[in-house]
């Protein structure tokens, strides 16, 4: 099955891993863009993007 996955927070990562482990075809993953955070305003990736 081809899947389009949409998610950003931490709790979106386990379902993404489970879909991949089950052998599903993940056609695309949509998540929010990186945001500048902290004192140095460094770009921080979303949890889904890191996975």
Image: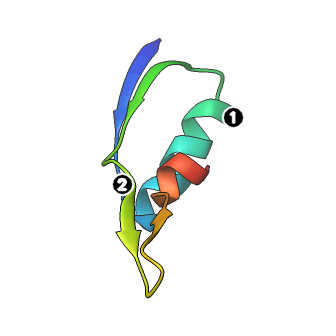
Of marks 1 and 2, the one in the foreground: 2
Q: Position of residue 45 (x, y in %)?
A: 49, 58
Quadrant of the rendered structure where residue 36 is? bottom left
Residue toward you, 44 or 5: 44
- Image height of 13 relative to 22, above or below: below
Q: Which residue is mark 2?
A: 8
Q: Distance from label 1 to label 2 (Cα)?
A: 19 Å
Side of 11 where 13 appears, left or right: right
Q: Earlier in the sequence, mark 1 or mark 2?
A: 2
Residue toward you, 14 or 41: 41
Q: Position of residue 7 (x, y in %)?
A: 34, 48
Few, some or many residues within 10 Å of mark 1 (<14, 14–19, 20+): few
Q: Residue at x 43, y 22 (%)?
A: 28
Few, some or many residues within 10 Å of mark 2 (<14, 14–19, 20+): some
Side of 24 where 2 appears, left or right: left
- Image height of 46 relative to 1, above or below: below
Quadrant of the rendered structure where residue 14 is? bottom right
Number of marks in the rendered image = 2
Q: Residue at x 43, y 84 (%)?
A: 38
Q: Which residue extends farthest front?
A: 40
Q: Position of residue 10 (x, y in %)?
A: 45, 66
Give the label on residue 2, or none: none
Q: Residue at x 30, y 48 (%)?
A: 32
Q: Which residue is mark 1?
A: 21
Q: Which residue extends farthest top?
A: 1
Q: Residue at x 59, y 42 (%)?
A: 18
Q: Secondary structure at mark 2?
A: loop
Q: Secondary structure at mark 1?
A: helix
- Image height of 25 relative to 12, above or below: above
């Amino acid at each position: 099955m081809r899947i389009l996955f949409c998610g950003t927070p931490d709790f979106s990562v386990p379902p993404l891993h489970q879909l991949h482990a089950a052998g599903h075809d993940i056609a695309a993953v949509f998540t929010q863009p990186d945001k500048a955070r902290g004192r140095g305003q460094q770009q921080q990736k979303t949890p889904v993007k890191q996975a």
